Amino acid sequence: MTSRKRRPVLDKGPHGIVSTYNRGCGCGECTAANTEYNARRRERNRQKLVWDDTLNREVYKATDITHGTASAYRIYGCRCALCEKRRIADNEANRVKKWT
Ligand SMILES: [Zn+2]
Ligand SMILES: [Zn+2]
């Protein structure tokens, strides 16, 4: 585990918006704005997930992601054959790392 560095609080606002958080501000308001933004983005992504009867899994149907990548299954939650294969491979890799 790497220790998390505390983000500095910027002198210049406006605070409580994502763009200030992205400029590096770590004040409570900006952090909360960023958390909410991420939650909303996840919610939007979830709406693009479609249940696939053949695979018996949720699959991300929009074409704006690259399947078989870590972000496709982690951020977008896709469970298509490609993404699932990548997820299992990554899990395997993590397990090996932990045990050695
Ligand atoms: Zn701030
Ligand atoms: Zn996929």
Image: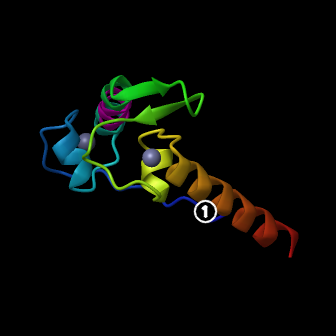
- In percent of width and height, residue 62 lies at 28, 38
Q: Is residue 39 magenta?
A: yes
- Residue, x 34% and y 23% (percent of image)? 47
- Residue, x 54% and y 48% (percent of image)? 81
- In percent of width and height, residue 28 lies at 36, 35
Q: Residues within 10 Å of mark 1 (few under 14, many from 20)?
A: few
Q: Quadrant of residue 97?
A: bottom right
Q: Is residue 35 magenta?
A: yes
**To which residue does mark 1 refer?**
3
Q: Quadrant of residue 60?
A: top left
Q: Which residues are magenta?
A: 34-42
Q: Quadrant of residue 90?
A: bottom right
- In percent of width and height, residue 11 lies at 18, 51
- Confirm if mark 1 falls within 8 A of ligand 1: no
How many marks the image carries: the answer is: 1
53 above or below 24? Answer: above
Quadrant assignment for the N terminus = bottom right
Type of secondary structure dominating the magenta stretch: helix
Outermost residue to the front: 54
Nearest the viewer among 2 and 40 is 40
Q: Is residue 69 left or right of residue 19?
A: right
39 above or below 1? Answer: above
Quadrant assignment for the C terminus = bottom right
> Given the image, on which type of amino acid does mark 1 rest?
Ser
- In percent of width and height, residue 64 lies at 25, 47
- Residue, x 60% and y 28% (percent of image)? 56
Tell me, what colour scheme is on the image?
rainbow
Q: Is residue 91 left or right of residue 28?
A: right
The residue tagged with tag 1: helix, strand or loop?
loop
Outermost residue to the bottom: 100
